[in-house]
Image (cartoon, rainbow, N blue to C red):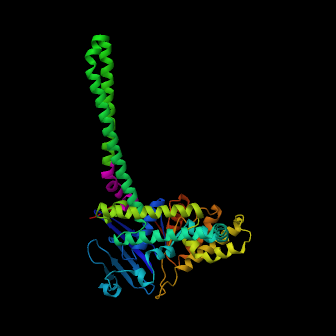
Amino acid sequence: MRFERLVIDSGDHSMAVDIHPRLTVLTGLGQFERDALATEIIGALSSSRPGVHLELQSDSGQRFAVFRPEGADPRVVDIDNRLDVTASFAGDDGRIDLLARAGLDPHSARRLMYVGSQRLTESVEGDRMILQLAGLDQAELWSTAERLQSAERQLEREADDLGSSAEDADAITRIEESHQEFEEAVAQAESVRKVNFLVAGIAALFSIPASQILGMAGILVLAAIAAAAVVVSMIYWKRAEAAGRAEAEALEAAGAHSYLGFHLQRVNGLLGSDAQRRRLLEVAEAQRDAKARWAALAGDVTVEWALEHRGAIVAASATGRDLTPQDTQAAGEALTAASHAMQQQFAAVRNVGPGMENFPLLLDEPFTGIDPAAVAPLLENILEQSAYQQVLLLTESDEISSWARLEAMTGALEVVEPAPAAAA
């Protein structure tokens, strides 16, 4: 399949991204924004993203529009024939889940379709990481991995029940942090106000005795202290008011100009109550703790990769051979290894599921940590492969954006900077 258009609705705002049939380079996105957008793209194929609509073309050439309006049943429309074909796609529970038709869930689909810098590094430096993990206490390694997997499954279940996703927990955390900053500013301003008015009151009370003892000089000193206290109190109160305005306006203002603010606004609207937020945040906190314990033990190796290569890791540990990671590959070998790893990623999304359908490949800053001299050949390789496999490249790299703008003149790709607009 190939995506044609992605539309995300959020209250008074919506965002539409027209997707090139070959290569779409989405620029100007920070890490949080890239994670969020990848979640929406993959979630558009699942059943858990209300407000996310997708137009796509199947490998057979049929074009469909998948509508998931808020508060209404999802629908699938055959675009060319203008027919409602929802019944052909709905499961027994009435949900429209294109991933399930391919034998996938959101977690396995993300692992299949989404490639970040870590994934490419894992493919290139697989032997080194196997030796790295083989040198650790195996009982502790795998028990830590199982705890992390259990925490992630619980987070996914909780998020799915709320019509959200596990990745949205980070967005919700940011919203909560913004609100907490406002509350702290108000509390600080109130505390300062009480102290300063106490100081001003004491200064006023002692003004008469001071005038009798020190004369006019005493009155002026106390008046200056009282005035300073009032000014300080006003400053802190103004700061609290500014924090309140920032909290009230941030999502709306940011949503008109950036995808980050738009996503935060949308995710905030998915959860209808404080109880839902707290429940999801508690589970997310447990997952973050488990992830931190894994990182402290395994370093930069993801738990998914470790479990996929568990047999090789256990075997390497059992042989007792030299477990010292080897030196980094030479530049030419690294380029060859990176090219081979990229080919494997393309192959993984071809012929997926019972229908042997091709899936788009999402690349999120895949070249971080790769020799800069190897980036240009890898980009050319991606462009060449996109003739057979649709690719969405998410980046904030000026170098990649410049390359993409030049190549866009040939029509082989399109450069997009996601930005929501007010709904009509």
> Which region shows up in magenta?
246-263
Nearest the eye: 79 or 297: 297
The percent position of residue 173, horizontal first and vertical second, equals 40, 58
Magenta stretch: dominant secondary structure: helix
Is residue 299 visible in the rendered image? The answer is no
Quarter-of-image position of residue 169:
bottom left
As for residue 197 lying within the magenta part, the answer is: no
At 45% across and 60% down in the image, what residue appears?
A: 32
**Compared with residue 249, is residue 332 higher up or lower down, i.e. above or below?**
below
At 48% across and 76% down in the image, what residue appears?
A: 108
The percent position of residue 161, horizontal first and vertical second, equals 35, 72
The percent position of residue 410, horizontal first and vertical second, equals 52, 70
At 32% across and 75% down in the image, what residue appears?
A: 68
Nearest the eye: 349 or 247: 247
As for residue 253 lying within the magenta part, the answer is: yes
| Quadrant occupied by the N terminus | bottom left
Residue at the extreme right: 322
Q: How many marks?
A: 0
Is residue 200 visible in the rendered image? The answer is yes
**Compared with residue 158, is residue 92 higher up or lower down, i.e. above or below?**
below
**Compared with residue 112, is residue 13 higher up or lower down, i.e. above or below?**
above
